[in-house]
Amino acid sequence: MTDDLTRLLQEHDDWLRVERGLAANSLAAYRRDLRRYEAFLRARGDVDPACIDDAVVHAYVRHLELLTGEDGRPLLAPASVARAVVAVRSFHRFCAREGLVDDDPSADVGAPRVPQSIPKALEEDEVARLLDAVQGDEPLAQRDRALLELLYGSGIRISEAVGLELADLDLEDGIVRVLGKGDKERVVPLGSGAARALEAYLGEGRLALRRPRARSADADAVFLNARGGRISRQACWIIVQRAAERVALAERCSPHVLRHSCATHMLNRGADLRVVQELLGHASISTTQVYTKVSPARLRAVYDAAHPRAHSATSAR
């Protein structure tokens, strides 16, 4: 039997999917968080959304913070709790805005503070070693080299690389069309290294990997696996890790680190923050700003070049 809680959760899910147009991964995360919230409410007997107050939401946040694993350590990191609170707020805000309940009980409920982590980018010479780690002209080597060059050369996400279709590439003009979070499309330039590696892979390696009986959904995928199907995110991660192991960077390297490195190196060389924001597909520039904290040396150089008292004789007095 469907009660009000089930009905409103489904209406909220439909709103996320249809009106907000969330990507599949984001939608799945909201669903996981709200299933946990629903289980908490039902265990308490709070099945009427109109009767849920801020004390209930506060209790849920505390419940998440106190969850522990078998080793006694917290089961959820502060970032995971904060994400769960976002999902709960979204649900209650939706219900209030649509007039389905009178008030939003989550309006004044705060999420735990999440320490801001600074991306650990590779040095430019380390990236060069990584990109040179894949040798050989066999099809899989050509694919792996093209993938590594693309991830660093464009800064796209691993999910965006996996989803690329042949029609998304324009190697002549050196650009790639990317479908990012929330199905937002953007055009990203390719460096010459990435363009050359992709051209070699598409001209030889991919043709060798292609299979006539591959699924129609994979027929135009840029990156193929050994069976001719679309490569998976996990396979991409393994490709990066194996290359990193060859140059002793395995503990510091991942597809996301290559994205970090792309942004950091561009900013270190004077790229405008707004341009890097557009390149990475960040909805907010505050997300991009974290990369400016990576290089104190760059801040020092800018200060020394721009501040009138940086080198004055009287500044040392």
Image (tube, rainbow, N blue to C red):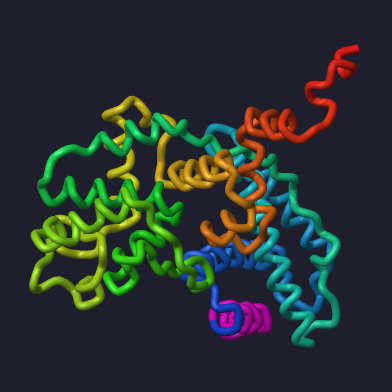
The quarter of the image holding the C terminus is top right
Q: Is residue 239 magenta?
A: no
On the image, which quarter does residue 37 sit in? bottom right
- Asked if the magenta segment contains residue 6, the reply would be yes
Position in image of residue 6 (x %, y %): 61, 79
Number of callouts: 0
Q: Tell me residue 139's x, y (percent).
A: 13, 51
- Residue 214 at what x, y percent from top left? 14, 71
Q: Residue at x 22, y 58 (%)?
A: 199
Q: Nearer the viewer, residue 202 or 80?
A: 202
Would residue 242 be found to the left or right of residue 276 on screen?
left
Asked whether 231 or 186 is in front, the reply is 186
Is residue 288 found left or right of 210 in the rendered image? right
Q: Residue furthest front?
A: 313
- Vertical side of 122 occupied by 27: above or below: below
The magenta stretch is 1-17
On screen, residue 135 above or below 112: above
Identity of the residue drawn at 73% across and 28% down: 304
Residue at 19% from the left image edge and 56% from the top image edge: 201
Q: Quadrant of the N terminus?
A: bottom right
Looking at the image, residue 35 lies above or below residue 147 = below
Q: Whole-percent x and y of residue 234? A: 33, 51
State whether residue 80 is above or below residue 98. above
Q: Is residue 162 left or right of residue 178?
A: left
Give the residue drawn at x 18%, y 55%: 200
Q: Which secondary structure class fits the magenta region best?
A: helix
